[in-house]
Image: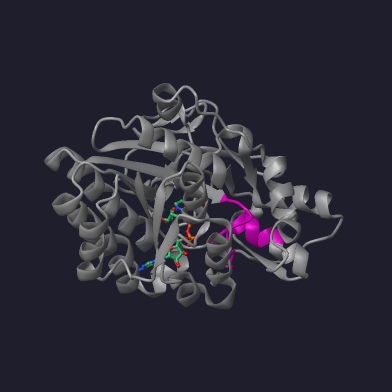
């Protein structure tokens, strides 16, 4: 089996590389360390790529930009992968707002370059796209209530796409002011991935993640909030809370639980163009305030914070993933990492990766 992982030095990509390589697959990565270009030194993923080379025997990375359609086509023509796990992206709202052209070229053009190359040279490959909950633009218009440490959806909020578990795939992606440039690019790529499944019968799947994390992230202020909180505590940095009184809620999934789901899709692909919301779910949901309390309790340190009233553009007030559709199609999948275990793992990052 040949697996191609884009964004191979990033959080999800590196987890996928290690997982598939451990199964005996030949794994090829595509990563040009663009995360460092987006986020500066904090975003540098070269340490993680070096780790992958150290820990694997059957992995080769290609320093190719997914925007380069010629090189991407050459690579896919040559490799003819059985599975393509597409994780490379510009992943941050604020960066997208400042650089909409870069965001579009990476997230939309990069995705169609991969889809086209696969359509021509690997048409039966499973193509798994890491989409985003940010495609759902009108989440902030849902009725909500304010609790002591977090916001919560109103109990009687029974709109299409909303259940007691959270947001499901029937939630509309049109309308609202909570998508921003990043979410709009992800939505465009998501629709293309679905359409390549429907139009060409390619085995495409969109996984709409919410907040993925793990010790292999290279957290930066603009992306990777929980790992960045842990980094701020570790290094005595100040964390800037942007709006919503720090009560904005996300559900957190560990990268290994995410990749477990990816592997199940590869083993038993659903209908072409299927969309799943994939996240940690209600049990793993936390607000920024609750997350900092958890991390402070583990480390015994106090987080230094500043607060600005203005929320980040496109930030959801509350988003919790309803994973019912995925769990119905893949009943063997379950969340292995609780929010407490995830926080502990992020705090332990130095003992896991002492050379960082
Ligand atoms: N982490 C999250 O909380 C989260 C939430 C929802 C969706 N997602 C999506 O999941 C995917 C993976 O997220 P992640 O957290 O692993 O991101 P990441 O930034 O850790 O990894 C992405 C990798 O892609 C590489 N890359 C970026 N642009 C590239 C380009 N043009 N050519 C080649 N390589 C390039 C980067 O250098 C980086 O190593 C992304 O598509 C992201 O939008 C992430």
Say which quadrant the N terminus sits in: top left
Q: Quadrant of ligand 1?
A: bottom left
Q: How is the image coloured?
A: one colour
> What residue is shown at x 83% (from left), y 55% (from top)?
299
Q: Position of residue 123 (x, y in %)?
A: 18, 45
Instruction: Based on the picture, tell me whether residue 303 belongs to the magenta stretch.
Output: no
Instruction: Left or right? Give the position of 3 relative to 317.
Output: left
* Above or below, comparing residue 294 to residue 219 in the picture: above
Q: Is residue 304 visible?
A: no
Which of 111 and 98 lies nearest the eye of the viewer?
A: 111
> What residue is shown at x 53% (from left), y 44% (from top)?
318
> What residue is shown at x 21% (from left), y 67% (from top)?
69
Query: Which image quadrant for residue 256?
Result: top right
Query: Which image quadrant for residue 280?
Result: top right
Instruction: Left or right? Give the position of 331 relative to 120.
Output: right
Instruction: Left or right? Give the position of 182 relative to 353.
Output: left
Say which quadrant the C terminus sits in: bottom right
Magenta span: helix, strand or loop, mainly? loop
* Above or below, comparing residue 258 to residue 18 in the picture: above
Which of 350 and 198 lies nearest the eye of the viewer?
A: 350
Q: Where is residue 208 in the image (x, y as percent from the top left)?
A: 40, 44
**Stretch in magenta:** 213-230
Q: Can residue 326 be seen in this view?
A: yes
Q: Residue furthest right?
A: 300
Q: Position of residue 91 (x, y in %)?
A: 44, 61
Q: Where is residue 6 in the image (x, y as percent from the top left)?
A: 38, 58
Instruction: Left or right? Give the position of 232 relative to 78.
Output: right
Q: How many marks?
A: 0
> What residue is shown at x 18% (from left), y 56% (from top)?
116
């Amino acid at each position: 089996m040949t697996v191609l992982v884009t964004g191979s030095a990033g959080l999800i990509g590196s987890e996928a590389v290690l997982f598939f390589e451990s199964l005996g697959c030949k794994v090829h990565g595509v990563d040009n360390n663009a995360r460092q270009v987006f986020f500066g030194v904090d975003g540098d993923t070269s340490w993680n790529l070096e780790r992958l080379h150290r820990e694997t025997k059957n992995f080769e990375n290609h320093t190719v930009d997914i925007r380069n359609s010629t090189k991407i086509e050459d690579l896919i023509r040559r490799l003819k992968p059985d599975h393509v796990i597409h994780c490379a992206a510009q992943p941050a709202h604020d960066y997208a707002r400042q650089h909409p052209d870069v965001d579009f070229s990476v997230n939309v053009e990069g995705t169609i370059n991969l889809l086209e190359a696969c359509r021509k040279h690997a048409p039966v490959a499973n193509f798994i796209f890491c989409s985003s909950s940010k495609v759902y633009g009108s989440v902030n218009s849902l009725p909500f209530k304010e609790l002591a440490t977090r916001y919560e959806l109103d109990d009687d909020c029974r709109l299409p796409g909303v259940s007691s578990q959270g947001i499901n795939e029937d939630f509309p992606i049109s309308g609202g002011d909570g998508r921003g440039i990043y979410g709009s690019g992800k939505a465009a790529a998501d629709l293309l991935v679905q359409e390549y499944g429907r139009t060409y019968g390619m085995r495409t799947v969109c996984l709409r993640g919410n907040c993925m994390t793990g010790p292999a992230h290279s957290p930066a202020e603009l992306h990777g909030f929980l790992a960045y909180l842990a980094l701020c505590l570790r290094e005595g940095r100040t964390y800037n809370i942007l709006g919503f009184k720090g009560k904005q809620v996300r559900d957190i999934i560990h990268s290994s639980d995410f990749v477990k789901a990816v592997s199940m899709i590869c083993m038993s692909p659903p209908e072409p163009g299927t969309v799943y919301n994939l996240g940690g779910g209600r049990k793993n949901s936390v607000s920024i305030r609750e997350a900092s309390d958890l991390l402070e309790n583990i480390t015994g340190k106090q987080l230094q914070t500043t607060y600005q009233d203005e929320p980040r553009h496109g930030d959801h007030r509350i988003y919790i993933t309803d994973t019912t559709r995925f769990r119905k199609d893949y009943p063997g999948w379950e969340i292995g990492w609780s929010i407490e275990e995830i926080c502990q793992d992020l705090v332990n990052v130095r003992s896991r990766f002492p050379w960082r």
